[in-house]
Image (cartoon, grey):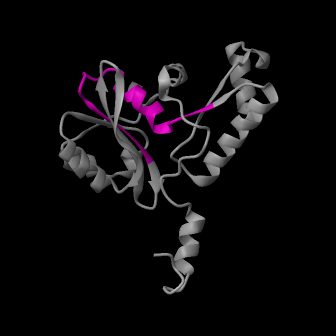
Amino acid sequence: MLEACHGLLTAAGVRISEIDEIVVGVGPGGFTGLRIGLATALGLGQALSVPVTGASSLEALALGIARERPEGSLVVPVQDARRRELFAAVYRTGAAGLEELVAPVAIAADDLAARLVAIGGPAWVGGEGVTAAGGAFAREGLTTLAADAPGNRLEAADLVRRVRDGAALPARPVYARLPDAEVNRLSALPATEAPA
């Protein structure tokens, strides 16, 4: 990961001493990936004596999806969460930017599609989770972005601007559900020992 960071800085012509802030995605996502990303960002922040701020990974994707959508549209970033679920959030576009309607959650694709229909309004669903959802969104008449659509591209500058405008989060992981290891541990417990 650090080698990739070094390559990115080199390609951008930026020296590490020029970094004055680090913005890191806090999820939701897999337990190990979030831990590694956050530990790396926090370690760099400490080594460089710069602040480390968190940002929603789903909101980063939502910013791209929202770029060319009319005001009042629903923007729904989705990632494959495995276990037949998606990591998703729902935002409405507006003059002031994105308004969060549904906080990041792990949810079955059919349940998310039904929720979007209940909220109402034109909706655009994007991200790599669209494929994992099968036809759940199409069955409800919702618009999905093709995998190579420009709206599925994350723009780091948009996210940093959003963080500076007040959308900063603590640099702590947002899992949206229990890690796989904990699910497996709980399912192995006798019914009398499992938490209620």
On-image quarter of the C terminus: bottom left
Q: Residue at x 40, y 25 (%)?
A: 150
Whole-percent x, y for residue 67 in the image = 36, 21
Q: Is residue 143 above or below residue 36?
A: above
Q: Is residue 141 above or below residue 54?
A: below
Whole-percent x, y for residue 168 in the image = 53, 30
Q: Is residue 59 at least partly visible in the picture?
A: yes
Q: Is residue 162 at least partly visible in the picture?
A: no
Q: Residue at x 43, y 42 (%)?
A: 128
Q: Residue 75 lies in magenta, yes or no?
A: yes
Taking the image as shown, residue 172 lies to the left or right of residue 28, namely: right
Q: Is residue 97 above or below residue 87?
A: above
Taking the image as shown, residue 148 lies to the left or right of residue 109, namely: right
Q: How many marks?
A: 0
Taking the image as shown, residue 188 lies to the left or right of residue 112, namely: right
State the residue lying farthest toward the right. Answer: 47
Q: Residue at x 18, y 39 (%)?
A: 120
In this picture, which residue range is highlighted in magenta? 53-79
Whole-percent x, y for residue 133 in the image = 35, 51
State the residue lying farthest toward the top. Answer: 13
Q: Residue 59 lies in magenta, yes or no?
A: yes
Whole-percent x, y for residue 80 in the image = 45, 50
On-image quarter of the N terminus: top right
